[in-house]
Image (cartoon, rainbow, N blue to C red):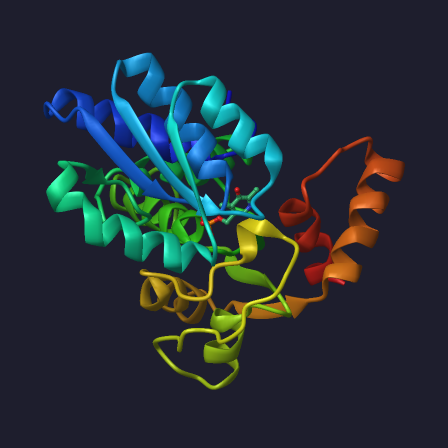
Amino acid sequence: PTGSFKARGLAMAVSKAKALGLTKLAIPSAGNAATALSIYAARAGMEAHIFMPQDAPTFNRKTCQLAGAEVTLVDGLITDAGKIVAERKADEGWFDVSTLKEPYRVEGKKTMGLELAEQFNWELPDAIVYPTGGGTGIVGMWKGFEELEAIGWIDGKRPRMISVQAAGCAPIVKAWQEGRTEADPWENAQTTVAGLRVPQAVGDFLILDAIYQSGGAAVAVTDDEIRKEMGTLAAYEGILACPEGAATIAGIR
Ligand SMILES: *Cc1c(COP(=O)(O)O)cnc(C)c1O
């Protein structure tokens, strides 16, 4: 409903925040999470305080403002926006709904895994190729598969989890290539693909764990390759993908 799958996580996070009596939510976001939070917070009658990089897509800024959120543009990356939220939240009485700093967004994103299982008739595909920023999608799907297996709806066959990142910001790819279980922050992150411009993921170790456990991989692709595959998807499939989505096609090649 808000133009990206971020709606899955934030519909859940905002609903739980509302049930638990919170009134003011804050988020650092590269764009799409900000839009999703703003819309759901408005619906719930709660305040949304948005911190996003000044070069985040204008669609996101405009949709947040349309929904009545308070938007602050930050001269920096999503990690810099995160620092501002962390510094101010106690004084302002905000609850921080940053990726993996509260427990419910991952429960919402988990539904991608549930839906995949259902659509594949409870037999999971061989591989899932996922454009990775903060990584909640991979972590959520993996959690969903674990739970489906625990209740006996799927067997133990899991997809290889394959993470795609932009060459100018690929901390997970670098960590995987080096066989590490945690990722170093990426210096000088540079990509025009907003959702993938995440130099440090809170859940890096969880993403890497799912990749290793599944026999997966992590691959970096350039912005030019991504733009080209946006064209491929449009021309051959009639799919007007965002660059993050198109990155998966570049990753597969
Ligand atoms: C946020 C986002 C991603 C990255 O997802 P994570 O689960 O945070 O890794 C990929 N694509 C789009 C369109 C996004 O908005």
Q: Residue at x 50, y 59 (%)?
A: 161
State the image coordinates of residue 162 (x, y, percent, origin top left). 55, 61
- Tell whether 59 sits left or right of 161: right
**Residue at 49%, 56% in the rendered image:** 133
Q: Quadrant of residue 252?
A: bottom right
In the rendered image, the vertical position of residue 218 relative to residue 159, given as above or below: below
- The part of the image, by quadrant, that contains residue 213 is bottom left
Looking at the image, can residue 134 be seen? no
Image coordinates for residue 218, horizontal then vertical, percent:
55, 69
Image: 124 above or below 196: above
In this rendering, the answer to whether 70 lies above or below 125 is: above
Across and down, in percent, residue 173 comes to: 53, 73
Q: Position of residue 153 (x, y in %)?
A: 35, 37
Q: Quadrant of residue 68?
A: top left
Q: Is residue 44 left or right of residue 161?
A: left
Please give left or right for residue 47 compared with residue 115 in the image: left
Q: Is residue 180 something one can see in this rendering?
A: yes
The C terminus lies in quadrant? bottom right
